[in-house]
Image (cartoon, coloured by chain):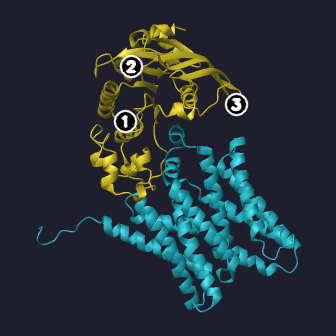
Amino acid sequence: MFSEPYMQRAFLAAILLGPLCGLLGVFVTARRMAFFSDTVAHSSLAGVALGLALGFRDPTWVMVGVSLLVALLILWLRERTDLLSDTIMALLMSTFMAAGLIGYSLLRGFRGDLDRYLFGDIFSIGPEEVVLAFILAMVVFGLLFVWLSPLTLLTVHPDLAHVTGLPVRKLNLVFVVLLTLVVAMSIRLLGIILVTSLVVIPPATARNLARNLRQESILSLAAGLLGGVGGLILSFQLNLPGGPTIVVTSSALFVVSLVGSHWRQRPPQPTLSRI
Amino acid sequence: MPDIHFHPGGLALEVRGLRVTLGNTPVLRGVDFHVPRGQVVALIGPNGCGKTTLLRCLLGLQRPESGEIRIFGRHITAEVLRRVGYVPQRLALDQSFILSVREFLCLKLRETRHWFWQSRRKTDGLLRAVLPEFELGPLLDRPVAGLSGGQLQRVLIAFSLLGNPELLLLDEPTAGVDTPGENSFYELITQIHQRHRLTVVLVSHDLSMVYRHAARVYALNGVICCEGTPEEVMSADSLRQAYGIHVTPYHHEHGPGHHHVLPPQPQV
C-alpha cells in the first residue's frame, strides 16, 4: 500500500493536515467560526476558476489568494457595516461560489477538474503540495505553541484579553489568516463541500471525552490524525473515494466517543453487595 | 467639578468632558467625574444610560469623540491598563469549550502561560497567591462555562487580582447572582479592598448594593446627574434625575438601608 509514491504523499498530507485541523478546530468551534471556514472553502471555487482562466496548470496559489481575500473581506465588512456576521458570510459565499461556477462554465476542457475541487482528490496530491502542507503545519503548530494562552483568552473574552494587554486585533487577524490557509490547503483532501468537517468533527469527538482544554486539544489532534489516516487506509482497501471515507471515519469516531461519554456518565448500577 | 487637591493620595480615575455618539445617538454628553485612590465607588444608572459605553472608554475599547480620561494621572495605554483589573459581567463561553478554572487562571500569569506543558503541582504552586483567599481549591478542575454566577464572579476577581491591579472595574457584578451569593460577593469585595488597598469601581443598575458598599456614588444618565454619598444620591430628587421622573426608592424588610427602585408607573 505504501510502495506507491502517490499513496505516500496522500499519507503525509493526512498526517500533517488531519491533526492540524483537529487542533485548530478546538478554537474554530469555540469561537463559532465553523460557518466562516465553510464560507472561505466555498468561495475558493472562484479562485480555482480564476487560476485556470489565467493559465495556471495548478491553481492552488490563486485559490489560496482568493480565500484570503474573502476572509479579509468578512473582517472588513464586519467592522465597517451593521450587518450580522452570518449575513456577510452567506452573501460572500454565494457570490464567490456563483462567480466560480460561471467562470467554470466559460472554461472549456476543465469540467473534470470541478469534481476534484468539490469533493477532493487526496490521491492526486503532488510533492509541492506536501512540502507546502509541511511548512504550513510547522508554522501553525509553532504559533499555537507560542500563542496558546493568548488565543485561549481571546476565545474566552476579547475585552478581557485587551485589558490583559494582548493585541486583540492582530491576534484575530493572524488566527483568521492561519485558518484560511489551513482550510484552503485541506480542500485537496476533502474538497470544498466536505472540508469544514475536518475542523468540526475532531473537536466534537474530543469534547465528548475531555475534562479540560489540555485533554480536549490532545484528543482533537488525535481524532484528526486517526480520522485522516484511518479513512485513507479504508478508502484504499475498500476502493472508496478518499475524502468522503475520511469524513465517515471521523464521524464513526465521534459516535464511538459519544457512546463512551454516555457510558462514563452512567450512574452506578446497584449490585448485590450494595443491596 | 470638585477640586482634586482635596485628595492627597491622588486620583485613581479622572474623566473630563467625555462625549461619545454611537450612530446618531449621543450616548455620553460630557461626563465629568473623578475617583480618589483607595475608594470603593459606584457608577449607577438605568439601562441605556451609557454605563457600558463609559466602561468601554475606561478600558480603551471605545474612542471618545472628545474629552479626556486619565488613570493614575496618565492617558490610557497598554502599560496603564496593566494596573487595571476588569471583571466582566459574564464570559461569552460556549458550554462545549471545556476550559477548567485552573487553566483559565493560568492565562493571566507570565509564569504559567505555558500551562499546557506544565504540571498541575507547578501551576497550583504559582497560583497559590489567590487560591485560599477565594476558596477556589474545589473549583480548580471544574469547567469555567459550568460555574454558577457567584462562583464565576469569584474566579473572575481572582483572575484580575493575579495581575496585582491598583484599580478594579466591575461590570454589573451581581447580575445573575442570588441574594446569599450577592451578600458574600460584597463581603469579598470589602475584604479585598481592605487587604489589597484597591480602588474599586462598581458599575451597576442595582441600587441596593450602592447603599451598603460604596463610599461614593455617581449617577449617570448621559451625564453625571448627581454624585455624593449614598444617602445624598438616594434622595428622591437625585434619583429622579438619573432614572427619570417616575422613580421612587423604598425601604423594605430584608436588610437595613436596602433600596430598590420602583418601576415606572403609568401616569393617570
Whether labels 1 and 3 share one chain: yes
On the image, the x and y values in percent for residue A145 come to: 51, 59
Instruction: Tell me, yes or no, if residue A194 can be seen here.
Output: no
Q: Residues within 10 Å of mark 3 (few under 14, many from 20)?
A: few
On the image, the x and y values in percent for residue A67 come to: 72, 61
Which chain shows up in yellow?
Answer: B
On the image, the x and y values in percent for residue A121 come to: 67, 80
Q: Which mark is residue B214?
A: 2
Q: Disc 2 is attached to a residue of which chain?
A: B
Q: Secondary structure at mark 1?
A: loop
Whether labels 2 and 3 share one chain: yes
Look at the image and give the colour of chain A.
cyan
Per the image, the residue denoted by label 1 is B177
Per the image, the residue denoted by label 3 is B23
Number of the front mark, 2 or 1: 2
Q: Residue at x 78, y 70 (%)?
A: A48
Image quarter in which the N terminus of chain B is found: top right
